[in-house]
Every structure is written in C-alpha cells, then in structure tokens.
Image: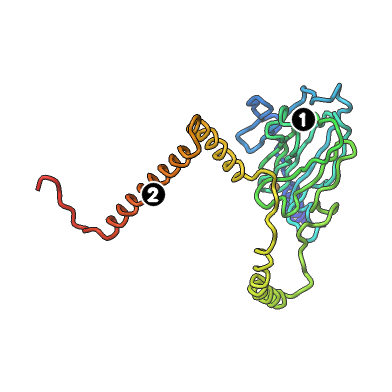
Amino acid sequence: MLKLLSVGLLVAMFSATVGAVDIEDHDGMLMDHGDGHLMDMGGGMVMGQNANTLPGGCDSISETKEITVHAGHKFAEKFPGRMYAFDTQEFQFEPCTKLTVHFVNEDNIRHQWMMHGLPKYLYPKGMFHLEVSGPGKVSGTLILPPGDKTYLVHCDIAQHMEKGMKAQLKVGDGDGDLPSIPGVTAMTYADDYKATLPELLKAAETAAKIPDVAVVAAAPAVSAQPQPESGFSGLTVVGLAIGLGLAAFLARKFDGMSASEAVATVFEWLRMGIEALVVLATRLLKLVTGDKNKVLPGN
Ligand SMILES: [Cu+2]
C-alpha cells in the first residue's frame, strides 16, 4: 500500500514538472554592446534600448510604466486561423512615457516584440526590439515619443505576424488602427471557409480562363487611354538641354554671317553628315557580305 502511494506521489510530481514551462530569464545574462544593443549567447536580445535620452519634443518623462507581454502559440487559440499571438493586442500610453517591457516567450522557438516607426535619430532603424529563444524572458526600456501616433508591434520572424503575432501601441490618442490585428481589426485578406475544396478549385479554374478574354477586350481601351500629363518628363528636360546647347552653339557659329552664308554652312554640314552615313553603311555591308577568310599580314 505504501509502495502504491509513493508511486502515485512520484507520478503526481512528475506531471507537475512537465506541466509547468520553465522560463529562462535572460535579463541578468545580457551583455551591453553599446548603442542600446544588448545580447547574450543564449538567444536573448534587446535593440533600441533607451532609458535616459528624451525624444525631441518631450520636456520630461510623463509617466513610468512597466508591462509584461507573453507570446506563444496558446494565445492564438482564441483567434480562428491564427497560429501565434501575444497575450495583448493593444497597448496605450501617454506621450513621453518611460516604458519597460518584460517579454516572455512561452514557445520552444524564437519570438520578438518589435516596435516600428520610432524616431530614427534616437532609435536605430526606428525600432525597439526584444527577442528571445523560448521559453525565455527578456526585458528592455524605451522612452516613447510625443504626439498621437499608432505604432506597429509584431514578431518579424517569417510568417509569425501573418499568423497572428501582431499588435498596436497607441501613444496619446494614436492615429488610427492597423489592419489584421487579431481580435481588434479585420483581416486584410480574410480566410474563406464557406466553400469546399472542389468548389474552390472549380472557381479558380473559371477565374483562370476569364483573363484571356478580359485582356483582349481591355487592350484597346488601355492603348486608347490618354497619356498622363506631367509638367516636365525626363525626355522633356533632355530635349530642352540639347535644344538650348545647340542654340548657343549655332548663335556663336553664325555670328557675323549673312543669311546665305549661314544656309550654305548648314548645307555643308548636311553633306558631311550624309557622307559619313554612306561610309558607315558601306562598311556595315562589307562586314555582312564580305569574305570571311582573312589573310594574315606578312603572308
Ligand atoms: Cu515569432
């Protein structure tokens, strides 16, 4: 009986260990590489760290905030068709807030919390970026710029944003909503589960046939369209430059000549031009029709 109890206790302990995700904290492991770039050999990274420099337009730090964002497959379960997600899709802070983000990646792959659109004079490439191989945690601090603006936050690893790891961070009132944020805004390209696969295939085949007719029908309409008018096209500028240059040259050349002298000069140039063309054409003709056998000099 005692044996059975201890076995049961062991099983219970084992399953408890399996159930809990062991998150590795990278905060104490990071090496400061300067310019807000911190990194360790275990897969943790912070870029665009800025805890001390006020962005232009901020007189002081308005608030100091700290958030913890979780990332992983399990947070996408409530969003049909999505694969990865953050546990929060929308953030909002006052302008000039000093924000510390603790990023917890609960998956056994890499994820990022990457914020775009920040002023480039302060944040390299306009980014603040946390990245960690999971399961792991990494933290970073930035100071948000002034003004009302909506910033994109996403995981930039291939297809992770498209599969749901996308959020928006509004500073002040923000300046609108971004598309395809799970649970917040509509998908730009929504999945369609209404049709069966054979139905979709048939529709795709029909759609593939239509363009042939459409292109033929549309072709005359396209060519009949008037060219868009632009004040100075590249060709116009080149033409003007040549014209002006030629005018200046001719003005110098014909200075002091009578009208008949000028006309004679122009005809002389024309004759020289035609002669040159004839010589060129003759050479070309010889090149095409001439004897392919070449006699080496000295033989
Ligand atoms: Cu990711």
Mark whose residue sits in front, 2 or 1: 2
In this image, 109 relative to 244: left or right? right
| Residue at (49% x, 29% y) in the render | 256
Q: Residues within 10 Å of mark 1 (few under 14, many from 20)?
A: many
Residue 138 visible in the displayed image: yes
Tell me which corner region of the image, top left, top right, bottom left or bottom right, holds residue 243: top right
For label 1, the SS is strand
Which amino acid type is marked by label 1? Answer: Thr
Which amino acid type is marked by label 2? Answer: Ile
In this image, 201 relative to 181: left or right? left
Q: In this rendered view, identify the residue nearer to me: 244 or 141.
A: 244
Do labels 2 and 1 touch, CB within 8 Å? Answer: no
* Vertical relation: 17 (above or below) 244: below
In this image, 261 relative to 212: left or right? left
The label shown at residue 141 is: 1
* Vertical relation: 121 (above or below) 208: above
| Residue at (80% x, 29% y) in the render | 143
